Every structure is written in structure tokens, then in C-alpha cells.
Amino acid sequence: MIFIMVVVMTGCADISLTKRNDIADNLAFQHGWQKSTLQTTFFSHRAYLPNSTQSDQLTVYIEGDGLAWISRNKPSSDPTPLNPLALKLALADGTNNVAYLARPCQYVNSNQCEQRYWTSARFAEEVIASTDQALSQLKKQTVAQELTLIGYSGGGAVAALVAARRNDVVRLITVAGNLDHKAWSYIHHISALTGSLNAADEWQNLADISQIHFVGAQDNIVPLAVAQSYQRRFTTGYKPEVKVIEATDHHCCWLELWPELLESKY
């Protein structure tokens, strides 16, 4: 299934980096959102948020892995997404106390952007630390006191890993999240993500955070077994909710269902 996904992505890889940036910019600007670049000790992060975002509570959507590979054995030269689903979900949130945060090296470039940061080391310590710093900047900018983190695909792992080291995250929500990349690699018989932290290993630091993890019933890329492996780490009474959503896979049809899922996420 991963091979099929890569073949499909290869056909879309002709979309230029400029075009991919334009897609995100246009989506944001159509909704009256502003673009921001957050500089951390490690990387730069692209962020989008409404012009009037100020609230005690801030919901931050974290992007997926983006265009990490252009063929089965060839990494992309830039992981900027072809289809920024987390951005689309953020724009569909319907509230002003929301922001979007891209992963390192998406939409922006720097000397630190080595290919390993969107392949084997996509969840490396420096990636998580950088995201942590970027979230603190967004929190300060919006005068927020508490955070809800919503991560799509690999962004779900990033959200969980960041939540595990903060004391201001009150909710953790993932959509098709890769919450146990060791289980994911085993299921697909592929090389482990060496150099990456694993969200499932942080279960003790996540046990007291309200969580819900949405899984696509037809998702063969990050199947239900991955979320179940993560869930099994938790002791009785602290196991997070895993909710299987019919008529969805890894990409479809989360955006169409998001308003309904938002009503039930808390």
C-alpha cells in the first residue's frame, strides 16, 4: 500500500514548490488568515492564524509529513505538502482561537533542512524541541494560557511528543495519527525511523491529558493497529479514546466530516 501511495505521489510531484506555497497562502488568505514565520533555535516554522486571535485557549493544528518521498527509494528535496490537510481542517474549525503550524522545512528552507528530518528523523529530538518553541511563540502571540493540539498523520506523533513535555496542553487530538512508528514500521515491513522519538514511549507523560484519536476505517497507511498499539501502553483507567470513522481513509474524507467530528471531539 505504501508503494501505491508513493506512485500516486510521484505523479503529483511535478507541482512546483512555488505552487505548493501558493496553495497554502491562497487558502489562508481566502479566510482572512495571516502568514507568519516562527524562528526557533533549530528551524523556521510556517504558521497561519486569524488576524484577531486572542483567547485563553488556543487550538493548534500540526501538519502531516507532507511530500516526504517522490518514489519508493527517493526522498523529496522539499517536504512542503501537496495537499495541506491540517491547514484545511484548521480553516474549517470555525473559531478564531485557532492556528496552523507546519512541520520543519515545510514552506520555508534553511541550512538545517537535511532530508533525514522528513524521512528517518522526522520525529527527532530537535524537531520536537523546535515545535515546542514554536508553540510557545504562538501561545505568547495569542495571549493563550492553554493549548489543544490537533495533529494529522505524522503531525499526530509530533503533537503527542510535544504534549508529553508541556504542562499547558489540555487536549490532544489526532487524525490518522502515527502514534507508534515502531508498530507502523513493523506492520508495513519497512525500515524503522531511526533517529526518531516514538510517541507511544511517552505514555506516562500523556496519561493525564484528555485524548481522542480518530482513525480511518479504510486507512491502510496508518491502520487501526497503530493506534491500538499506542493505546495498549496505557494502564487501565487511563487508556485514551480511539474512534474509528467510517467512510474515511488516510486522506479522504476528513475535511467533509470535520464539522461533525468537531462537535464530538470534547
Image: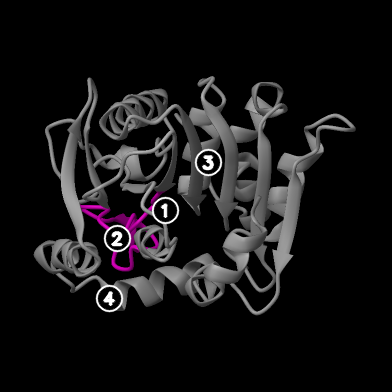
Spatial CA distance of label 2 from label 3 is 17 Å
> Residue drawn 62% across and 57% down?
188
**Residues at circles 2 and 3 in contact by the CB criterion of under 8 Å:** no
Residue in the foreground of this view, choosing between 72 and 202 = 202
Q: Residues within 10 Å of mark 4 (few under 14, many from 20)?
A: few
Q: Quadrant of residue 84?
A: bottom left
Q: What kind of colouring is applied to the model shown?
A: one colour
First of labels 2, 4 by sequence position: 4
Q: How many marks do you count on the picture?
A: 4
Q: Measured along the vertical axis of the image, is residue 89 above or below residue 129?
A: below
Residue 81: mark in rendering = 2
Residue 178 visible within the image: no
Nearest to N terminus: mark 2 or mark 3 = 2
In this figure, which residue is indicated by the disc labeled 3?
Answer: 157
Span colored in magenta: 62-84
Q: Find disc 1 in the rendering and name its residue.
A: 64
Give the farthest residue toward the right. Answer: 236
73 horizontally vs 261: left or right: left
- Element type where label 3 sits in the image: helix
At label 2, the amino acid type is Pro
In the rendering, at what x and y percent does residue 161 appear? 52, 31
